[in-house]
Image (tube, rainbow, N blue to C red):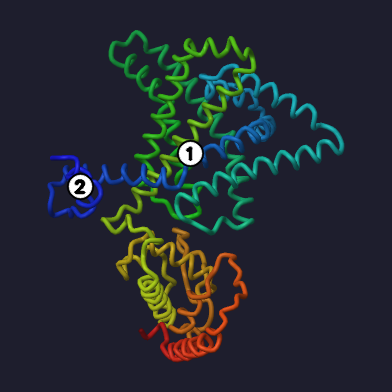
Amino acid sequence: MNIDQIKEFFSERIWQISKEELPGFQYLGINILKRIILAIKFFIDKDVISTASALTYSTLLALVPVIAVLYAIASGFGFSKYIESWLLSTLNSQPQAAEIIIGFVHSYISHTHSGVILGIGLLVMLWTVLMLIHNIEAAFNQIWQVDQQRSLIRKVTDYLAMFFLAPIIIVLQSGISIFLATVAKEMEEYMLLGPMVRTFIGLMPYVITSSVFIVLYIFMPNTRVKLKDAIIPGILAGIAMQLLQFFYIHCQVFLSGYNAIYGSFAALPLFMLWVQLSWTICLFGAELTYTSQNLEEFAFLANPHDISQKTKVKYCALLMHHICNNFKKDELHLTALQLKQETGIPIRIVKELLNLLVEMRLLSVSISEDDNEDLCYQPHSSLEHCNMGKLLEALENYSKGDKEHKIKVGEMDGKWNEVDKLHQDFLHQLRNIPLSEL
């Protein structure tokens, strides 16, 4: 197989292979390969590295307030010491940075215990924390092609629940670790159980980190993420994080020259690098979750910006037809996935065009009433106003801010007015074609 054949296989042939052409394990391998290729492609196309850099800055800005909030909540239950031990174990590759952060947290809390400073300090702290979570949610929504963020009420309730649950989970994790360490000590004499317990304790960090990533991939995007599609990416991200920790700890000897140059200040750039790599791992796992849930055949790679205007009009009319026809029958509103299944249009193009139709105020969005909480689409106005003429006119006039400038066309003025009149007559005739009856 020469280079041209390899290129053709990865660019075309691999996306055309059907389940009937290959045995089960081979087709499974092809599907895994497609997921990885798509994740890498979208990771590069969406410039996720820049997103990771932005989240690194937000994390550094909000890290002390976040730990302070967790510390304050845990202190109310008498569990503040567990937060410190958890932070030290989490940043075991960055012990100097962990100690600095703990010192900042104690200083932060001690300086916000009186009068106006307390009120202002709490407001600034909460705002910084909420902005970090908002930026994380926006990054995940960008990966999942979701334009609508959570409502303000849902943000408050979800985020507060997360912050109250986090200290409880940390305490439970610490209790389980202490219990397992005690059991392992008592079972050292047993030939079989002792090594098994030690192996389980060694795997605990991988299990905990992977579980955190799985929950993050399911919870953060403002759309339904299936558990089965988040498990493998979450496990891979958890393993990658533990390998990063291992690599970082065992490379400290190579960074001794860096420490000699920067002294105690070296902890900051090294910690920033660690945070940057951590977010890169996290976001790549999110991309892998997205491709796993939305894996399609060759058409999945179709770029919405590559289709012609004629095809865009046809697809928009087809989507509007199904939505209007469904609304006419008083049935449940349709989701993007249901529209993809009914029309056969690739899911990326469906989502892109649905967002376009919402921006043009031809469709409106609601949240489904079932447990999935998927976005559903229905006509923005009455069905009598949903016609082919209005759709075509909206697509022609759609703009993201470009203003129309007055220009002189000289002798063309008269002819252009005539052309414009014919065009308006054409749109008027199209208004007699309801989209629900196409």
In primary-sequence order, the first of circles 2 and 1 is: 2
Judge from the rendering whether residue 160 lies leftward or rightward of residue 176; answer left or right. right
Tell me residue 89's x, y (percent): 53, 21
Observer able to see residue 66: no
Q: Secondary structure at mark 2?
A: helix
Judge from the rendering whether residue 277 lies leftward or rightward of residue 61; answer left or right. left
Observer able to see residue 410: yes
Specify the amino acid type for callout 1. Ile
User: Circle 2 sits on which residue?
Assistant: 9
Between 148 and 230, the residue placed more toward the observer is 148
Q: Residue at x 69, y 32 (%)?
A: 72
Work out whether 424 lies above or below 317: below
Tell me residue 268's x, y (percent): 61, 23
Q: Quadrant of residue 217?
A: top left
Work out whether 346 lies above or below 46: below
Tell me residue 339's x, y (percent): 37, 68
Position of the C terminus by quadrant? bottom left
Position of the N terminus by quadrant? top left
Q: Residue at x 56, y 29 (%)?
A: 171
Q: Quadrant of residue 374?
A: bottom left
Q: Quadrant of residue 169?
A: top right
Between 4 and 44, the residue placed more toward the observer is 4
User: Circle 1 sits on which residue?
Assistant: 49
- Graded by Cα atoms within 10 Å as few (under 14), some (14 to 19) or many (20 or more), the crowding at tag 2 reads few
Q: Secondary structure at mark 1?
A: helix
Specify the amino acid type for callout 2. Phe
